[in-house]
Amino acid sequence: LVLSSIAYNLKAKPEDILIEGISEIAPEDMYFANEFEFTIKLLGIAKVRENKVELRVHPTMIDKEKMLAKVDGVMNAISINGDLLGESLYYGAGAGGEATASAVISDLMDIARDQVKAPMLGFVNTLEYELLSKDEIYTKYYLRVKVEDKIGVLSKITQLMSENNISIDSFLQKPKKNDENYSTLFFTTHLTYEKSIQNLLEILRKQDFIKTKPFMMRIE
């Protein structure tokens, strides 16, 4: 929110944007990520689309070859994509006692010196952007669905996806043990809207062949 307010002159509150944590990530998701050369990172994302800003914070699957995928431990990074510059990465310590203490002391020093009156970066931002609604988020998605192992289930799921204008990019079925009466299905989608995915998840939860709550993660 702080960075987006500087970059886009946008005044948004935490309750206005999509925020999700990592509590629902399961070992099966790590299995899929490894099989398809992804890694999972908790990202804060800001994008401009049609003069509106898309803001969201959530676990994200990203390609293992991306620069952000290699940021680990107490290190944090900011990735910026420009029209002409392409991708650039700003990398440094962002967690842990010493890094946090350094940031806090720096802020306190700025306040003590009364340096907060000047415009950020020495200029007044005159840009005006609106916040994109959560339903209008447009990206790729990963789905994990645990279902009864019976004929017709996969066909029904793909039918429901089609009815919600969701196109399948890839599919994987995790091998099951002999004593299991369920299967775990993994899907990735082409670009689609958040509203379409949420509608699909709501419908899937009501199906009698669903064993546990379906799980979704966004892909960048």
Image (spheres, grey):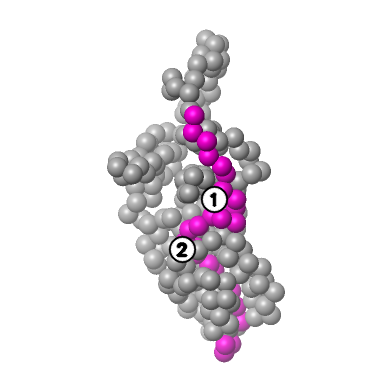
Residue for badge 1? 58
Q: Looking at the image, which is closer to me, 50 or 165?
A: 50
Q: Can residue 105 be seen in this view?
A: no
The residue located at (37%, 57%) in the rendering is 63
Instruction: Specify the quadrant of the image occupied by residue 92.
Output: top left
Q: Is residue 28 visible?
A: yes
Q: Give, as a three-letter code, the residue at label 2.
A: Leu
Q: Where is residue 10 in the image (x, y as percent from the top left)?
A: 55, 36
Q: Looking at the image, which is closer to me, 92 or 43?
A: 43
Residue for badge 2? 191
Q: Does the magenta stretch include residue 190?
A: no
Q: Looking at the image, which is closer to me, 158 or 31?
A: 158
Q: Earlier in the sequence, mark 1 or mark 2?
A: 1
The stretch of residues the image draws in magenta is 126-152
Q: Does the magenta stretch include residue 140?
A: yes
Q: How crowded is mark 2: few (under 14 residues within 10 Å), some or many (20 or more)?
A: some
Q: Position of residue 46 (x, y in %)?
A: 49, 44
- Label 1 secondary element: strand
Query: Which quadrant does the C terminus fall into?
Result: bottom left
